[in-house]
Image (cartoon, rainbow, N blue to C red):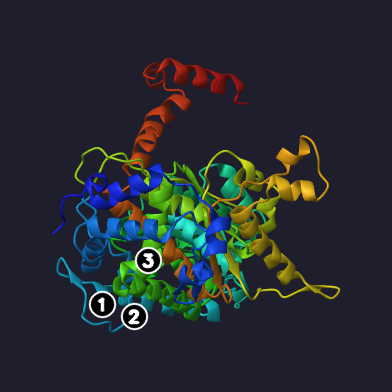
Amino acid sequence: MVTAPIDATTTPAWAELAAAHSSFHPDLRGWFAADADRAERLSFPLADLHVDLSKNLITDEILASLVRLAEQTGVAARYAEMLSGAHINTTEDRAVLHTALRRPAGASPELVVDGQHIDTDVHEVLGRIRAFAERVRSGEFAGVTGKRVATVVNIGIGGSDLGPVMVFEALKPYADAGIEARFVSNIDPTDIAQKTADLDPETTLFIVASKTFTTLETLTNARLARDWLWAKLAEQGAIGDDEASRTNAVAHHFIAVSTALDKVAAFGIDTDNAFGFWDWVGGRYSVDSAIGTSLAISLGPDVFDEFLAGFHAVDTHVATTPLAQNVPVLLGLLNVWYVNFLGAQSHAVLPYSQLLHRFPAYLQQLTMESNGKSVRWDGTPVTTDTGEVFWGEPGTNGQHAFYQLIHQGTRVIPADFIAFANPAFPLVDGDRDVHGLFLANFLAQTKALAFGKTAAEVEAEGTTGPLVAARTFSGNRPTTSIFAPALTPSVLGQLIALYEHITFTQGTIWGINSFDQWGVELGKQLALQIAPAIEGDEAAFAAQDASTRSLLAYYRAHRS
């Protein structure tokens, strides 16, 4: 049974944290100098991940108060509710069961929710995805002219795009079947035009990913892709100019990730090639569902299985590990400390891996769509600030762009640094291991942010005058270091699940529903009202506010 949220600000732990903050003077240099065991004590294992919290702005006493805050706000109990299928998505009256997507076959006890045999249903879909992926990879499933699939184009938006594209980019070294994956999401026609410009229609497979098969952007792009396919195949003489030929072409070149089988069939897609998921899977939590079909095809079902196993390892850790050693919970608590007590408004995620270049963008939706809320799950106003702006870029690219602000700006910006001991592409420059040089930067940045550089140290190097202040670094800039042996499918699943559960922890403490997204609806509704005005409807034009009418007039005047 879902209970009312506990107001974190009324708990004894919150009072402890407020008192600690009132006299708080971070001193990472001093703390490390006085405590030889700090790094070891504040480093934790999580499956294949090594997570070092020692360069965060916390003392043992603050961390203990944060753990008590998790206890007093019921984090463990709410996680148990989620795993059991309680309807913790209160505004939509739904269970939240993305963790069920990665439960292994035969898991015990069986998960039955609202009369649905969850494990059976999940593995039935996974089995169908595996079988279809193998057919595509072997060439058994081919285009209308019999040519093997060479490119899979995933058409989706939000969680139906950000997850698959991020994972494909991260695991591209595992793509072993000669099948490229591309991703179309933006309704800007440039996106679909550029993604299809150099493709051979005879070897292209489109995946239309929309649970309801009604998403405006996705269905618009799907129709554009269908028109492109028909035109190109006809131009090449591969199909005739008749309805039967076009229908046959769609059946050979389109599949769907959707449960709206009537709409799938109306589009022309063979419903045997439609893969569904359930209303208890939120879009931003869906990459390990049928939304990952493009990954099972391009990377292979075995890689996808390993990916799911990584998620499950973290799910198990969260369910079975005491809060004081529970890594996602601890990281969520640190974020609460930074947002609600130290005034942080953003959070940097800095992967030292070019393969993870889309990971910060993926986390933007996961965290900001989940916790960007101003009401609690019972509809009452929040009692604290909620959410942070998540952002970042990979490796040394970021160092030459925005690290200045993190090092010497006036704002507290907690940063997560992610790195791997072994690279996907081990290269040398002369006698130098380039990956080693890359990781030297990873280690140097966290050291510089933590310990800084004093004016005396700057002067000892011969600097004088006003340059001393400019070259002084205050230090005490908080970072978390996350290390793993290599970026494997399992490790990537672990990283995603880590941030899912960080987000869950923060949402629970703030008393918000992290699993709805009503904030995205209003703009979509208004776009449908404005579209007729764009197309010349004068009544729709007149119904707009003065600013919108002015902008519409500019558009009309300049559209050629």
Circles 2, 1 touching at the beta carbon (< 8 Å): no
The circle drawn on residue 164 is none
* On screen, residue 337 above or below 468: below
Q: Secondary structure at mark 3?
A: strand
Toward the viewer: 483 or 256? 483
Q: Say which residue appears at 27% left-offset and 82% top-offset.
A: 107
The crowding category of the residue bearing disc 2, from other C-alpha atoms within 10 Å (few below 14, some 14 to 19, many at least 20), is: some
How far from the left and from the top, in percent, is residue 461? 81, 50
Q: Name the N-terminal-most of marks 2 and 1.
A: 2
Amino acid type of disc 1? Thr
Q: Is residue 186 above or below residue 61?
A: above
The foreground one among 289 and 556 is 289
Please tell me which of labels 3 and 2 falls first in the chain. Answer: 2
Q: Nearer the viewer, residue 458 or 505?
A: 458
The kind of residue tagged 3 is Ala
Select label 3 or label 2 by which is in front: 2
Give the x, y percent position of residue 254: 47, 63
Alpha-carbon neighbours of circle 1 within 10 Å: few (<14), some, or many (≥20)? some
Q: CA distance from mark 3 to mark 2?
A: 23 Å
Residue 15: give x, y in percent of width and height.
28, 47
| Residue matched to label 3 | 274
The alpha-carbon separation of the residues under discs 2 and 1 comes to 11 Å
Q: Residue at x 24, y 72 (%)?
A: 118
Of helix, strand and loop, which one carries label 1?
A: helix
- Can you name the residue that lies furthest to the bottom here? 106
- The residue that label 2 is drawn on is 104
Please give the residue where the numbered disc 1 appears in the rendered image.
120
**Amino acid type at image mark 2:** Pro
Q: In the image, what residue occupies the spot 44% across and 44% down?
A: 342
- Secondary structure at badge 2 equals loop
Residue 152 visible to an observer of this rendering:
no
